[in-house]
Amino acid sequence: MSQLTSNTVTAADAPPAVHAEPCDRCGAPVDALDKFCPACGAINVRLKEKVGQPVKGQAEPPPVKSEPAKFFRCSNCGAEVQTDPDYRSYVCPFCDSTYVVEYSPELTGRQRTEFAIGFAVTPEQALERFHTWIKDNSWFRPGDLSMAEIDQKLKGVYLPFWSFSMLAQSRWSASIGEYWYRTETYTTIQNGKPVTKTRRIRETEWWPLSGNHHRYYSGYLVSGSRGLPQHQADRIKPFHLAALKRYQPYMIAGWLCEEYSVDRESAEALCRAEFMQWEQNNIKNFLPGDTHRSLQVTTGFSDINEDLILLPVYLLTYRYQDEVFQFLLNGQTGKAAGDKPVSWRRISAAIIGGVALILILLLVFFLMSR
């Protein structure tokens, strides 16, 4: 990473010029004395390097201080969100509820975040992706859905996820089937005469088998947010975990960040169930023979490790006719998912129009056939 060089001073009392450098994350121009990128909120690393290195003839600049964040809890869905101290929105980004109260994180005794992945999708790109997504089948969208109000609700949020790794050790038993074939002779009637033919019949020979199987599993991400159920989180996967970096507080500067509301024990139980399914599928693929039946698997897990990580997600939650809808966008890959309201009046009109068109075509065909 290049170092910030000192500006040339033409007079003893002249202040140094301020130059713009590209942001290390998004490439937007950042003034040398700005703390954060105005486009993506990333910390200005060059300013950190410059602190403690005053320009000759100038007073030493004050050190950059990290201001305390604010923490809010939603009384409706239970989400807990960390925000910048200047953030003034009291609307929950998960359920669009205004029942949000401030709380102190010191009272929770939470586990520390270990890793994080930064946003690769800019807010402008996320909004463009949302417009593309919502316009798909736009004819069935209600005409009174105010897009101007919805656009303002799109928020980039670092969401907590639990990542587990564990060793599965299994004892299995099953009946293994192997195919063999025999030739059968039979008689049939053709043209009023009996004809003798042969056919190939498949038989299965069954025999019992048992054994052991073990495999190390990892890579399944469990949502640590009550506001983002697991089935919703699965819709915007995968995240490329090779991009994980050791968490530092400056990484979430300028973004919302939710505290985990699904505890480790609950997340581990869900992950165990998923890994159990993976283990059974792997055992099925491991079994010899052509087929099997009566498979019984007993699995135990050991060497369990967990990481609490923050992943970038864009959220847009809004209400339409007292129903909550949510749009999700993977902030790393740009994968979109969600649900949107439909106009049943327009759908009914389309169905009635389709039925009417079919009846008209049938009538025309009937008249022409006469």
Image (tube, rainbow, N blue to C red):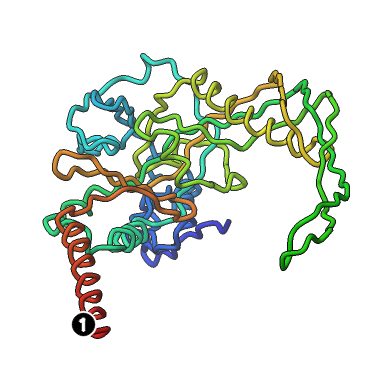
Query: Residue at position x 31%, y 63% from top?
Result: 136
The amino acid on which the numbered mark 1 sits, given as a three-letter code, is Leu
Left/right of residue 307 with respect to residue 186 in the rendered view: left
The secondary structure type at the circle numbered 1 is helix
The image position of residue 56, as x and y in percent, is: 45, 54
The image position of residue 289, as x and y in percent, is: 84, 39
Q: Kindly identify which residue carries mark 1.
A: 367
| Quarter of the picture holding the N terminus | bottom right
Query: Residue at position x 39%, y 24% from top?
Result: 261
The image position of residue 250, as x and y in percent, is: 44, 40
Q: Quadrant of residue 303?
A: top right
| Quarter of the picture holding the C terminus | bottom left
Q: Residues within 10 Å of mark 1 (few under 14, many from 20)?
A: few
Q: Nearer the viewer, residue 75 or 119?
A: 75
Q: Nearer the viewer, residue 4 or 162?
A: 162
Left/right of residue 223 with respect to residue 193 in the rendered view: left
Q: Report the number of numbered marks.
A: 1
Image height of 19 relative to 273, above or below: below
Using the rendered image of the protein, determine whether residue 302 is visible from the camera's viewpoint: no
Using the rendered image of the protein, determine whether residue 74 is visible from the camera's viewpoint: yes
The image position of residue 71, as x and y in percent, is: 30, 27
Q: Nearer the viewer, residue 48 or 168?
A: 168
Q: Residue furthest left?
A: 144
Q: Quadrant of residue 358?
A: bottom left
